[in-house]
């Protein structure tokens, strides 16, 4: 009678001999770079499984390799699905898209009104700097004011928008 370890080691020897063919087989079935990992998983399964006689060890190994690949693919799909669902839950935005767009437009109007209330120069400096990406020194030269004036006007705009943001967050 053959011992358990000799049956397992016999399958492992067949796996070693058929390794190149098994790698091509797995690659053809979509394993790609994971083919080596699939074979490693198969090796681990063989070493931990109860050994029993196998009539055709090569066919057995090819079927087993395909099963391991299929299990890995299912696990990957399941993991991706869970991740996607978790991200959807984490977003947690119960408002429909249309409502969010309307709210965003209303908040933009409030921000524009707030900036205009600070004066046309503050509004212009903020827009040139934050929206158009013009440097503060260039804005100062363009408007004929000091760099310090540009900085102070930007600070006024930032303070006003921060207060507006607090109001939005409280809503």
Image: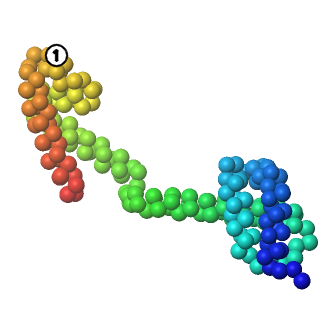
Is residue 29 among what the camera can see?
A: no
Along the horizontal axis of the image, is 84 left or right of 125?
right
Along the horizontal axis of the image, is 6 left or right of 41?
right
Query: Which residue shows up at 79% across the image and 55% down it?
Result: 19
Q: How many marks do you count on the picture?
A: 1
Where residue 49 appears, as percent x and y from the top left, is 74, 76
Categorize mark 1 by other alpha carbons within 10 Å: few (<14), some (14-19), many (20+).
few
Residue 132 placement: quadrant: top left
To which residue does mark 1 refer?
142
Where residue 4 appears, as percent x and y from the top left, is 80, 79
Residue 111 placement: quadrant: top left
Between 156 and 22, the one lying in front of the other is 22
Where residue 80 appears, as percent x and y from the top left, is 56, 58
Residue 5 placement: quadrant: bottom right
Query: Which residue shows up at 12% across the image and 27% down it?
Result: 150
Between 19 and 6, the one lying in front of the other is 6
Is residue 161 among what the camera can see?
A: yes
Where residue 62 appears, as percent x and y from the top left, is 82, 61
Q: Residue furthest bottom?
A: 1
Q: Residue furthest right?
A: 55
Locate the N terminus by quadrant: bottom right
Q: Above or below — where is 128 with respect to 58?
A: above
Q: Above or below — where is 31 with respect to 139?
A: below
Query: Which residue shows up at 17% across the image and 42% down it?
Result: 161
Between 100 and 77, the one lying in front of the other is 77
The color scheme shown is rainbow
Locate the C terminus by quadrant: bottom left
Query: Which residue shows up at 56% across the image and 62% down it?
Result: 79
Query: What secondary structure is marked by label 1?
Result: helix
């Amino acid at each position: 009678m053959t011992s358990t370890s000799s049956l397992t080691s016999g399958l492992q020897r067949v796996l070693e001999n058929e390794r190149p063919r098994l790698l091509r087989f797995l690659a053809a079935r979509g394993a790609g770079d994971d083919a080596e990992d699939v074979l490693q998983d198969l090796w681990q399964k063989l070493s931990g499984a109860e050994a029993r006689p196998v009539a055709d060890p090569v066919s057995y190994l090819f079927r087993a390799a395909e099963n391991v690949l299929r299990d890995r693919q299912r696990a990957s799909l399941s993991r991706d699905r869970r991740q996607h669902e978790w991200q959807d839950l984490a977003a947690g935005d119960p408002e429909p898209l249309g409502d969010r767009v309307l709210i965003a437009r209303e908040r933009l109007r409030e921000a524009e009104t707030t900036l205009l209330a600070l004066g046309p120069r503050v509004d212009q400096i903020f827009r040139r700097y934050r929206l158009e990406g013009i440097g503060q020194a260039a804005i100062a030269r363009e408007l004929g004011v000091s760099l310090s004036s540009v900085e102070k006007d930007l600070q006024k705009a930032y303070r006003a928008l921060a207060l507006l943001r607090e109001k939005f967050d409280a809503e």
